[in-house]
Amino acid sequence: MKDTISLIETDLIDDKIQKILRQTSYTQEKAREKLQEYNYDEIQVIKSYFGISEKKEGVIKSVNQEIYKQLRSKLNSNMRDYQERVDRGEVKKIV
């Protein structure tokens, strides 16, 4: 278990609680509890209320990896579109 110490001014806590109250339907007590739970980060409290999770993307290590990732993505989407057209019968057969 990590022990962390954070210093927050009480005036800032009241401001943060007011922000949470304006954006959510929490009571003042519930907002204070959630604020403590999320280490006094009002943005995280509001995001958790609306069910917004943190976006996590794969780490690209080089420019070449990013280029090939985008190429694969584009080719996959084109092949998927082509297969859908074949399934619908919109593609003419070349003999």
Image (tube, helix red, strand yellow):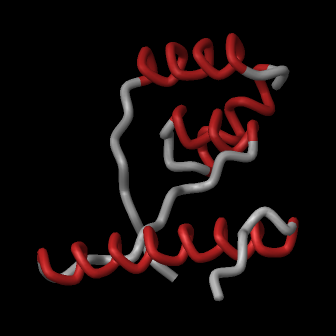
Residue 85 horizontal side relative to residue 19, left or right: right
Q: Residue furthest bottom?
A: 95
Q: Residue at x 62, y 54 (%)?
A: 53
Which residue is at the front of the view, 91 or 51?
91
Which residue is at the front of the view, 56 or 9?
56
Q: Residue furthest front?
A: 95
Q: Residue at x 87, y 66 (%)?
A: 88
The location of residue 32, given as percent across then percent down, is 68, 32
- Tally of numbered tags: 0
The location of residue 69, given as percent across then percent down, is 34, 78
The answer to whether 65 is drawn above or below residue 48 in the figure is below
Q: The C terminus is located in which quarter?
A: bottom right
Which residue is at the front of the view, 18 or 69?
69
The location of residue 18, given as percent across then percent down, is 61, 12
Which residue is at the front of the view, 30 or 77?
77
Instruction: Write down the quadrant of residue 59 in the picture.
Output: bottom left
Q: Residue at x 65, y 71 (%)?
A: 82
Residue 59 horizontal side relative to residue 47, left or right: left
Residue 62 horizontal side relative to residue 86, left or right: left
The answer to whether 85 is drawn above or below residue 50 in the figure is below
Residue 63 horizontal side relative to residue 86, left or right: left
The location of residue 78, given as percent across then percent down, is 54, 69
